[in-house]
Each structure stands twice: as C-alpha cells, then as structure tokens.
Amino acid sequence: MKKSIFIIFFALFFIKNVNADINKEVSDLKNEFKQIKEIYESKIEALEAKIEKLEHEKSKYNEHASKENDMHNDHEKHEGHSEEGNFNIEAVLNGKYTSFSRSGEVAPKGFGTAHEGERGREGLQIGESELIMNSDIGEKFSGSLTAAIVREDGADKIELEEAYVESLEGSLLSNTFFKFGRAFWNVGTLNPQHAHADDFADRPLPYRVFLNKAYNDDGLETSFLLSGSNEVGFGIFRGEDFPFGNTAGSEGHGSDAWSAFYKSSFNISSSEEIAFNIYHLSGKSRTPNARVSNEDNVTFSGDSDLSIINFDYENAYSSQGKFKLSAEYFYRNQDGTFEDSEESTGAIGFDDDDGGYYIALVNQFNDHFSMGFRYSELLAASTPTGLVDSALDSGGNDPEAYSVMSEWKFDSSAVIRLQLNHETPQPNIVDNQIIFQYIMYLGSGGHDGHDH
C-alpha cells in the first residue's frame, strides 16, 4: 500500500516538472519569434523607405529628360529636320562605255525619233547621273525631286526630271491616290521607273520611238484601288513632252494630253505572279508648237493616240533564283501632217497606224548574277507618196533589235552590266553594239529599293 502511494506521488511530481519545462520552452520560443519579427519588420520598413526614395528620384529624372527631349525636337524642327519627316537624299552614278559597228546616227527609218530615243554617244560617258531628294510632307503627302546631269552639245547640263507631290495611302480618300507635278507617269510598265532601275542597259525600240524613252510631262494623275490587286486611274497633262511637243505655248491652254490605265496582278501559286496592264495616252500637237524629231528635221502636227498592252510573269523558283518574262505591245494612230525639212517634202497629210512590241526574258541565278534576252521590233505604217525617200519612209523595213545582257550585282548599291545589241534600224544597215554599264548608288537607296 505504501509502495503504491509512493509511485503515484513520484509520477505526479515528474509530470509537474515536465510541464514546467515545456511551458518555459514555449515561452522562450515566443520571445525569440517576437525578436525575429521585430528585426524583419524593421528591415522591411527600411527597404520600403529606400524604394520610395529611388522612385521619387527616377520620376524627377524622367521629367528632366522629357523636357530636354522636347527642347531637342523643337530645335530640330526649327532647323528644318525631323525624324518624322523621313528626309532622304541620294545620288545615282550611271556610267557607260559604248561601241557601235555603224558610225553616225542611224535612227529607225519610218518613224520620227527624238533625241532621247537615239542610241546615244559612243565611248566613255557618265550617262545620266541623278540627284534624288524625297520626304514625307506632314501626315498626308510625300514629295520627290530628281535632277539629272546630262552631256549635250559638248556641255554638262542639269535637267529637272521629276518634281512631284503624292498623297499617302488613305490620307485623303479611302483607296484613292493623287499625284501632281512633273513625273514619269503610268504609260507603259517601264515608264514610271527611272532607266537605271531597268533590267537592260537601254530601253526597247517601242519606248525609244513612241515615248522618246520616257514620258514625264507636267500634270495630275489619280488612281483607285479596286477589289483584289486591281487598279484603275487617269491623268491630265500639259502636253509639252514628246510625243506631243510644246502644245501649251502661246496658243495652248496647258491640258492638251490625257491618259487612262488599268492594272491587275494575281498569284497563281506561292512563288508565281502574273500581271496584266492596259494603258492609253492621247494628245494634240499643233503648229507653231508641233512635235519635232530627227534632229529637228521632222515635224508632226495633229492628233496622236497611243495604246499599250502589257503582260508580266514572275517565278521565284528558289530562295535566290527568279525568272521574269515581260511583253508589251504598242499601237499608235496619228492623224495630221508630217514634214521633213531636210528633204523639203512640205506638209503632207497623214492618217495611219504604226506599232511595235518587245519580249524580254531575265533569269536571276542568285543574289549576284543575272542574264537576260530581249527582242524588240517596230511595225512601220505605209508611206504616203509625198514622204517617199524621207526619214518617214521605212523602205519596207521593220526595224528590229536583239539584246543579250549579263549583270553582276555586288550588293543593292553597286551593279555592273554587259550588253550586246544587234540592230537593223534601216534597210540593208546592221549595227552591232557593245554596252558596258555601271550603276552606283550613293545614299539610302539601291537597285532593289529605288522606286521613283
């Protein structure tokens, strides 16, 4: 009995002491946790204060930088420069070496060929080097100016090729574009671009004879984007450029020529594209400001209507390879009088049609090397009796030209080209030509991106 009481007493004493130890340990842990909490709360408060200070300093810095940037932009605007203006300036050096087997000028007979449509000078020459400036004009327009440096009559001259303003996409009317000033207008596929952007060193016979290489009159052109890749447009022009002559002189009213065009293109596969275009150009030439050609010996006074049909096919058959087929047909009606002063024909009535066409094949083997072949022919009109033996008498010959071209592109800013031509411009006359051409772009443009 005494033993049992002793055991119970001992157990109670042990439990009491254990409980006291646990309570003490819990109390110690609470005190330690409290101390840790106070330490970390203090550190968190210090970090929050530091972050707030840094954010305040950052806000002051951004405000200062913004003011300085505004001052810098205001200064640029005052000086006439703005990043938004996107002002670009570049030069194009278009040099050539030419050699002809036939000496003297041998313009195609049966047609009135003006100065720019002739084959050009022989030997080394700088060709038509150009200075080009273009920029956005506010939010609705862009503008471009191109001046060409040419050699004529033993002297270097500066010619204004283009000076135009055009509306930006959707800036005035939805799907409508306006272009006004002096420009290479939509009259044929090659006409809107400068000659240095062509695939060949010279232009095909129809462009040289019917458009004096290119038509860049003063005027206004508007175009409308239709569904898909279809575009229709029309233009009115002063009528001072070939093929019309200076009709806007003392008796003209400055809008004696007009044009219309329709352009359509579509993809037939992921790598193939087809384009089909129709153009028409109509105008008047009137004495004393009639159209002159053949070294000012041939004069035409009357109405001229030119229609052009174009077909293009492109196949990007590999990452670097591309094949292109281009064909254009020209049809012209002239109703008026011709006179050849060199042959003393007098004014002879003329109302007839002539034409011409070309086919060009170009294959780009890689990013650097291309080769091409082109055939062009002129289809002469019948010769009136009064013009027999004059420059307008084709002698039954339809002038034709074969061209073979090879091109090496170092990059988008440097191109060299070798071209061989075989021409029969007149009956029983053959002219074999060698043309070596270099095209160098100084500035922001390039052979791939220049789209004037």
Image (cartoon, rainbow, N blue to C red):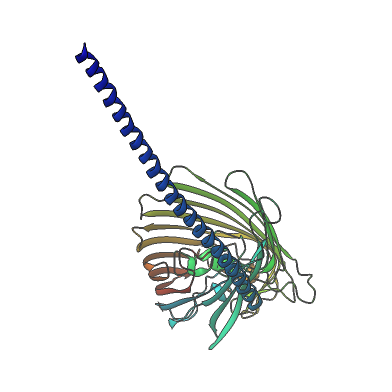
Farthest front residue in view: 2
To which quarter of the image does residue 292 belong?
A: bottom right
Asked if 286 appears above or below 309 in the picture, the reply is: below
At horizontal 54% and vertical 63% (from top left) the residue drawn is 58
Q: Nearer the viewer, residue 377 or 180?
A: 180
**Quarter of the image with the C terminus in it:** bottom right
Q: Position of residue 5 (x, y in %)?
A: 24, 15
Q: Position of residue 448 (x, y in %)?
A: 46, 63
To which quarter of the image does residue 304 belong?
A: bottom right
Q: Position of residue 328 (x, y in %)?
A: 52, 56
Q: Position of residue 187 (x, y in %)?
A: 61, 60
Farthest top residue in view: 1
Asked if 42 appears above or below 451 in the picture, the reply is: above
Q: Nearer the viewer, residue 10 or 125?
A: 10
At horizontal 60% and vertical 66% (from top left) the residue drawn is 63
Decide if residue 394 is in sight here: no
Q: Nearer the viewer, residue 260 or 50?
A: 50
Asked if 254 appears above or below 37 in the picture, the reply is: below
Decide if residue 27 is in sight here: yes
Left or right of 289 in this view: 404: left
Asked if 32 appears above or below 238 in the picture, the reply is: above
To which quarter of the image does residue 193 belong?
A: bottom right
Left or right of 198 in this view: 115: right
